[in-house]
Image (cartoon, grey):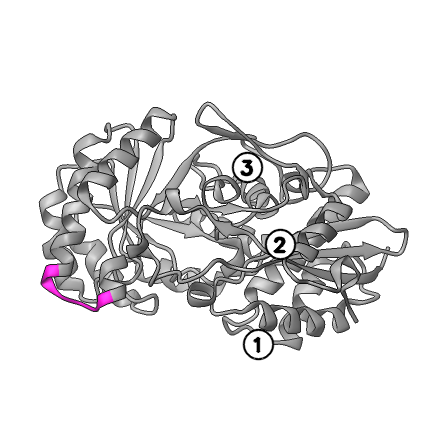
């Protein structure tokens, strides 16, 4: 069965301010994203859906750039066999970026829609197409951006009470916004100390510096005081390309080291393994290009005994459910961040998306059914686009 058509539709979610703490965070992500919904329709009318995230500062792609990239990919994929997933990636890489970092968010959304479509065609969930599941329920992780020790401690306690088993405490935002200084680093350390004081030892704390600490030796000096906390890991303290620095920190620290932004392809993952630069990674489908390369990265990590956490971008329900499908294939059950559609982004009007994962009692649960298990009410989507000035509505076709 062949690809007949690829459509793309803008989504206009809004950040939920209460979850982000205070306006001090805004210089890092200055405005709400415009995510893009992808629909791939086969010759028999069956369709699959995927989602492209467009965080400008973080992923380096605007909605306009993503839509232009969809057009490029669609030209090469029309008439392509829907089940030839490797061939689809090969065509996309040949059409744009040639294996460099660009275009991976768009490739991820198209990959997601293809897996959804193939799953529906064979009456199989996506995780079955990826090789099968270890579990379909997941402990939860959330990202916390609060910028005072008091507000961070309160937020941590709140999520622990909800049953969350993973908390990502942001400790690099001030440095990213203001530049490196000892004063800013001390402020970040105070926020981390407040989290550690209230979180029980059976809950993971990932202290995420978001590349903001710069110096391997400053990193070691800063984290030495936290060595007694066996539930604490340090995430991406250095620039994503500084794998030698990450390896130095890991080899001289008793705390586990996580790499996030450094993980953008299977090839990059191989370099990380060669240098023994981390103990765990964060896998983001948007950054690596979708399920196919994501599963390759998982296989590399598991062969090298490196842990894998799955993180939202943030996504709406489509991408968050996709996160759980790939998390189902990971042997070691680290908490999953799949709450972007609830805690970070709000879609108006409600009811655009139906089905998808269910959050309850501190866990996420995948739905039964083929493909991703998420669908779209196209009439509600049309109203959503009209409310946001998208005059072409759901007739926007990528040709």
**Place of residue 218 in the rendered image (x, y in percent of width and height, measured from the top left):** 13, 61
Q: Tell me which label, 1 or 3, sits earlier in the chain.
A: 1
Q: Which residue is mark 2?
A: 51
Quadrant where the C terminus is found in the figure = bottom right
Residue 118 in sight in this render: no
**Residue at the (25%, 41%) spot, across then down:** 152
**Place of residue 291 in the rendered image (x, y in percent of width and height, measured from the top left):** 59, 52
Q: Quadrant of residue 214?
A: bottom left
Magenta part of the protein: which range?
178-183
Q: Which residue is mark 1?
A: 97
Q: Which residue is mark 3?
A: 328
Within 10 Å of disc 2 (Cα), the crowding (few <14, some 14-19, many 20+) is many
**Residue at the (60%, 32%) spot, across then down:** 366
Within 10 Å of disc 3 (Cα), the crowding (few <14, some 14-19, many 20+) is many
Q: Tell me which label, 1 or 2, sits earlier in the chain.
A: 2
Question: Dot 2: what SS?
Answer: strand
**Place of residue 254 in the rendered image (x, y in percent of width and height, measured from the top left):** 17, 46
Q: CA distance from mark 3 to mark 2?
A: 19 Å
Q: Are marks 1 and 2 in contact (CB under 8 Å)?
A: no
**Residue at the (60%, 46%) spot, across then down:** 348
Q: CA distance from mark 1 to mark 2?
A: 20 Å
């Amino acid at each position: 069965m062949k690809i007949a058509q690829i459509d793309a539709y803008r989504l206009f979610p809004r950040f939920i301010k209460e979850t982000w703490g205070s306006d001090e965070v805004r210089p890092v992500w200055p405005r709400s994203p415009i995510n893009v919904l992808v629909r791939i329709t086969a010759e028999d009318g069956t369709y699959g859906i995927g989602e492209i995230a467009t965080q400008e500062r973080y992923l380096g792609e605007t909605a306009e750039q993503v839509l232009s990239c969809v057009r490029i990919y669609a030209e090469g994929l029309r008439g392509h066999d829907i089940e030839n997933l490797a061939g689809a990636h090969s065509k996309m890489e040949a059409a744009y970026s040639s294996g460099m970092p660009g275009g991976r968010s768009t490739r991820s959304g198209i990959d997601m829609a293809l897996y959804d479509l193939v799953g529906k065609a064979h009456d199989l969930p996506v995780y079955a197409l990826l090789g099968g599941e270890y579990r379909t329920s997941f402990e939860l992780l959330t990202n916390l951006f609060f910028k005072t020790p008091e507000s961070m401690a309160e937020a941590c306690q709140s999520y622990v009470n909800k049953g969350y088993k993973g908390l990502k405490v942001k400790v690099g935002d001030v440095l990213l916004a203001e530049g490196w200084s000892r004063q800013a680093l001390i402020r970040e350390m105070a926020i981390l100390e407040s989290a550690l004081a209230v979180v029980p030892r059976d809950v993971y704390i990932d202290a995420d510096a978001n590349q903001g600490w710069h110096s391997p030796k400053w990193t070691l000096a800063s984290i030495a005081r936290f060595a007694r906390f066996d539930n604490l890991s340090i995430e991406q303290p250095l620039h994503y390309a500084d794998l030698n620095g990450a390896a130095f920190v890991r080899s001289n620290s008793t705390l586990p080291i996580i790499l996030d932004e450094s993980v953008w392809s299977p090839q990059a993952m191989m370099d990380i393994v060669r240098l023994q630069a981390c103990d765990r990674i964060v896998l983001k489908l948007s950054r690596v290009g979708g399920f196919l390369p994501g599963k390759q990265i998982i296989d590399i990590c598991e062969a090298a005994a490196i842990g894998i956490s799955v993180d939202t971008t943030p996504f709406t329900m489509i991408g968050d459910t996709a996160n759980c499908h790939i998390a189902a294939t990971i042997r070691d059950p680290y908490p999953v961040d799949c709450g972007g559609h609830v805690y970070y982004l709000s879609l108006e009007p409600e009811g655009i998306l139906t089905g998808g994962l269910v959050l309850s009692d501190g866990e996420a649960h995948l739905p039964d059914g083929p493909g991703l298990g998420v669908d779209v009410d196209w009439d509600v989507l049309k109203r959503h686009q009209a409310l946001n000035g998208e005059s072409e509505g759901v007739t926007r076709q990528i040709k």
